[in-house]
Image (spheres, rainbow, N blue to C red):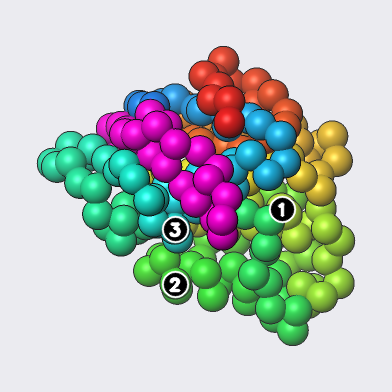
Amino acid sequence: MISSLTAENLACVRGDKRLFESLSFRVRAGQALAVEGANGAGKTSLLRLLAGFLSPVAGRVLVKTATRESDDAEERGRLVGWLGHLDGLKPQLTVLEQLSFFARLYGRHVDPAALETVGLSRQADLPCRYLSAGQRRRLALARLLISNRSLWLLDEPFAALDAAGQELVAGLMLRHCGSGGIIIAATHDALGLGNESLKL
C-alpha cells in the first residue's frame, strides 16, 4: 500500500513541445487529485509519466510505502492501476476470458463478482467485439478492480459512460479512497470526492 506519491519539479517534453515544468505536488493515502487543463496541456502525459510509461526530462516521482521510499519507475509501475483511453481488449475473447487474461497478468485469480460490480455479469460470455463503448469502459473498470493496485491513474474516467455508469465510477473511486487508495485523474468533470485539483 502506498502512503504517498510526491512529484518534485517535474518537466515533460513531447516532440518539440515543453508541456510543463517545475511541477510539484503530493498526494497521500485516501486522497484524490484532479488534473485539469485544456486539451494538449499535458494531462495524459503527466499520467503516463507517473505510471512510468514516460521519463521526465527533469525532476522525479517518489512513492512512499510502509517500508521504503523509491523513485524507481519500474517499481512504481507495479503499484499502478491504469485506466486510459485505449481499452486493450481482444475482440475475439469473451468478457470473462478477457478479464481472466488480465487476472493472470496481475498474478491473481479472476473474480466474476467484478463483472457484477460493473454491471456486466449478463455479458460474461459475449465476445468483446459486440460490446458498446460504455460496456467496454465498464470492462476496463473491472480490470482496474481486479488489479488490486493502490494507485489509480485515470484518464477521463467518466468518458463513454451514461449517467448510471458515471455514478458507478464515482462510487468505485469513493470506495478506493475510503480504503486508503490514491487516485490521480485527468478530467474535465468534477470527481465529487472533495479532492484537490492541479491545473496544467
Residue 54 — which label?
3
Badge 1 marks a residue whose secondary structure is helix
Give neighbour class at mark 3: few <14, some 14-19, many 20+ (Cα, 10 Å): some
Can you tell which quarter of the image residue 86 is in? bottom right
Give neighbour class at mark 1: few <14, some 14-19, many 20+ (Cα, 10 Å): many
The dominant secondary structure in magenta is strand
Badge 2 marks a residue whose secondary structure is helix
Q: Which residue is mark 2?
A: 105
Task: Give the left or right position of residue 134, taking residue 84 as reference.
Answer: right
Residue 24 — which label?
none
Whichever of labels 2 and 1 marks the residue nearer the N terminus, that label is 2
Can you tell which quarter of the image residue 24 is in? top left
Whichever of labels 3 and 2 marks the residue nearer the N terminus, that label is 3
Q: Quadrant of the C terminus?
A: top right
Residue at 86% across, 72% down: 130
Query: Disc 1 residue type?
Result: Arg
Measure the C-alpha gap from mark 1 to mark 3. Answer: 26 Å
Q: Which residues are magenta?
A: 1-24
Q: Position of residue 120 (x, y in %)?
A: 74, 57
Query: Disc 2 residue type?
Result: Leu
Name the mark nearer the viewer: 1 or 3.
3
